[in-house]
Amino acid sequence: MLNLAVVTHRETFETMKGPLKRRGVLAKYIDAYGKAIPISERYTEFPDVDVGFVYPSRLMEGGVIDSFLEVPWVNGLESVLLSRNKGRVLAILEKNGFDIPSTIMISNPISEEELIEAYENVQKPMVIKPNSATRGLGIVLINDVDSFEGVVDYIKLVQDREETGDRSFLVQEYIPDARDYRVMVIDGEYVGAVERRFKDNYSDGKKWKRNVHRDAVAIGVEMPESIIKIAEDAASLLGINYVGIDILANEERIVISETNARPTIDKEEKYLPCFYDKLAALIEKMNKCY
């Protein structure tokens, strides 16, 4: 039985532990936040494990946890940092021929003239989003220049603090009438997908965000071969072992909007029957390669 350290959302741990245990992997949850962790002596509360699942989202705590555990990660620090930098991921994908929304990265401080030029160079309506946040946090749909400048002012207020490491954000084309998919890829192979939909009918335009953490629902769906190939090729290019590829598709385009190296695992029946077989095999592979 392989022991797997899981430092991620509790809901993902609860979902995955049963199916993985039936495949010879014992998931052990590590709650490393909101506590004192001695560094000058061996911290004995961490369990003995063989492999880590995904590198902790809090990088400072993650560095300490990683040093104590001394194990390979299914998705290590490099994969998490790459996926978190949305602008970098999009630049890599665009350079290699993938369709992405028209996107401009704004690096503060920026002049008023350059800011307005960026606004004018992206089709309206447009989306403003943080370069590194998750769960749909801080994403705003913009239709006019006054709203654009107002949102940018708020961003500047936050980023003016010296402690803020990331002083960038993205201005991005809004893809109308698009279906919103999270396509899961494990070790380069497609293992299922969900479509994120509103719980209620918001065809009147009162809502447009389909993040599950913002009251949407994830419905298991079958993907056409065209989307499967895009997701697999993107995952292979980025070199992320376990990844959710976020795809927006309408009648005209199939675009990758972002990736997630720490995707929440949904109910087993929403994915292909091979999902946990592939995940368990990847965990075993990481252990053998270490």
Image: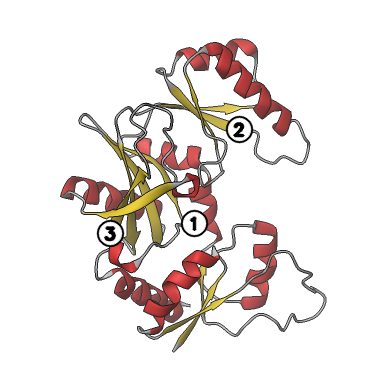
Q: Secondary structure at mark 2?
A: strand
Instruction: Pick the quarter of the image with the N terminus.
Output: bottom left
On residue 79, the disc is 1
Disc 1 or 2, which lies upstream in sequence?
A: 1
Could you tell me if residue 75 is visible in this image?
no
Disc 1 versus disc 3: nearer the observer: 3
Q: How many marks?
A: 3
What amino acid does circle 3 point to?
A: Gly
Task: Classify 10 Å Cα crowding around label 3: few (below 14), some (14-19), many (20 and above).
Answer: many
In the displayed structure image, the side of residue 167 where residue 231 appears, left or right: left
Q: Secondary structure at mark 3?
A: strand
Image location of residue 287, percent across then percent down: 45, 79
Asked if 32 appears above or below 98 in the picture, the reply is below
What amino acid does circle 2 point to?
A: Ser
Q: Secondary structure at mark 1?
A: helix
**Residue 174 position by quadrant:** top left
Q: Circle 3 is placed at which residue position?
A: 192
Q: CA distance from mark 1 to mark 2?
A: 20 Å
Q: Residue at x 54, y 63 (%)?
A: 9
What amino acid does circle 1 point to?
A: Ser
Task: Classify 10 Å Cα crowding around label 2: few (below 14), some (14-19), many (20 and above).
Answer: some
Q: Circle 2 is placed at which residue position?
A: 168
On residue 278, the disc is none
Q: Residue at x 63, y 19 (%)?
A: 150
Q: CA distance from mark 1 to mark 3?
A: 21 Å
